[in-house]
Amino acid sequence: MFYPEAIQFLYDLRLFGAKFGLENTFQLAAFVGNPHQKLCFIHVAGTNGKGSTCAMLESVYRAAGLRTGLFTSPHLVSFRERIQVNRRLIGEDDVVRLVKELQPLLKHFPNGHHPTFFEVVTVMALKFFAEQKCDLVIWETGLGGRLDATNIVTPLASIITNIQFDHQQWLGNTLAQIAAEKAGIIKSGVPVITATDEPEALAVIEKMAREKNAPLKKVGQVSSLSWAGKMPALPLAGEHQKTNATLALATVEILQKQIPVAEEKIRAGLQNVDWPGRLQQVTLPVGRRILLDGAHNPAGAKTLEAVLAKNFSAGKPVLILGVLQDKDWQHICETLAPLAARIFTVPVSSERSANPDELAEACRKINPSAEITACDCLDNALEKSAGDGFVVITGSLYLVGESLEMLGLSPANGGERGLNEWAAPPAVLADR
């Protein structure tokens, strides 16, 4: 087996969609020796900010000398981004080896209960991190929390970044329902840290924490921490990243007795954190500025709006917008369309892409004075906006990944972006 064959095998697992539940993951992990029982975790759930918070925690603990595992999703370009040790992507040879080791084990599952792509990848990551003797794994949920495959671990701390509307077809149509799914990662006696400020959602998290006897730390401003007034300058743009940093700092403080980290290492970790595709500004050799941001839900669009108002207020940017059909693209258009004088709507490289013509029509209703063009591909939009000095590309992390490749900012590996797809029919989660 070679790497392309391993990727094809993982791609074929999409046929099994997404099944919510832990039984398969527990069983598959048991087949490979329960590697999660040999590891320490920080488990991170939430609507927005999960990846950035994970990146900050990983950077801090790596700066402190720990061997860190990082598990995140989706990937921007390469599948290997999902599984990293000390921020080095898992090697192609290791992907092949792990696929070969897990492949025969899948035959032990009865018809109708075949492990899904995410379940298999979760156990691949656990096995790899255990083999690599990671001191600490920063462990991001895939979707939700309660029935997410990542929830077979018992972490040192659980983080719920925030609760906003996203993935309603799977997680519920109210903030309370969504919070109940995210709060499913709370374990008995394990501290919980959250920046959730929506009262309806916070009440659910508080109730779950009480029932599990899990100490709850609510963070808002940095002033609530011993780091008040000492927050270092962050390389990640946006005021919201200060909230993510506060979450990371609170977690590090809570775990100081178990994993001591000196203040200078905390500072170094935060100052050197790297997380592409989130308000990532690049300047091309011709002097053209491009801002890449995966604002894929209404809350993310609001964050992008705030950053543009504060940091890029001189003139309106050109907007290249592509969104997934199953996202709340109408509200995203309502937020972002007024910000631009020219808008190019594009398809996302996904089976779930929203129609560019529909996006364009929604933007025209919000901003009739703007010049709005529906394009048949991203390359077309980039060509049409080649003379513009400042371009914002947003609406989906999938689109950001495609942009990184097309702009030569990441090695071309477009065939692996399809691994972010899975044919999951909307389902009501049991026992909500």
Image (cartoon, grey):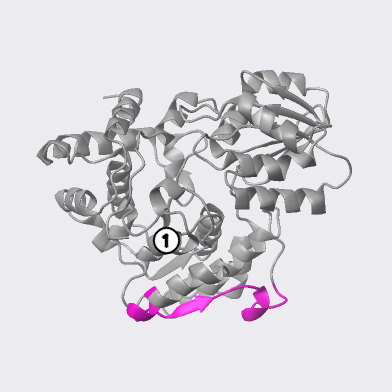
Q: Quarter of the image for the C terminus: give it.
A: bottom left
Q: Is residue 223 magenta?
A: yes
Q: Quarter of the image for the N terminus: give it.
A: top left
Residue found at the far right of this picture? 314
Task: Indicate left or right for 304 with 275 as reference.
Answer: right
Work out whether residue 5 or residue 17 is closer to the camera in this orientation and state it: 17
Judge whether 402 appears above or below 219 on screen.
Answer: above
Q: Position of residue 93 (x, y in %)?
A: 33, 33
Mark 1 lies on residue = 177
Which span of residues is magenta-colored?
208-230
Residue at 56 percent of width and 39 percent of height: 397
Residue at 48 percent of width and 28 percent of height: 350
Mark 1: amino acid: Gln
Residue found at the far front of this picture? 365
Residue at 68 percent of width and 18 percent of height: 380
Instruction: Specify whether residue 142 is in view.
Output: no
Q: Position of residue 40 (x, y in %)?
A: 34, 65
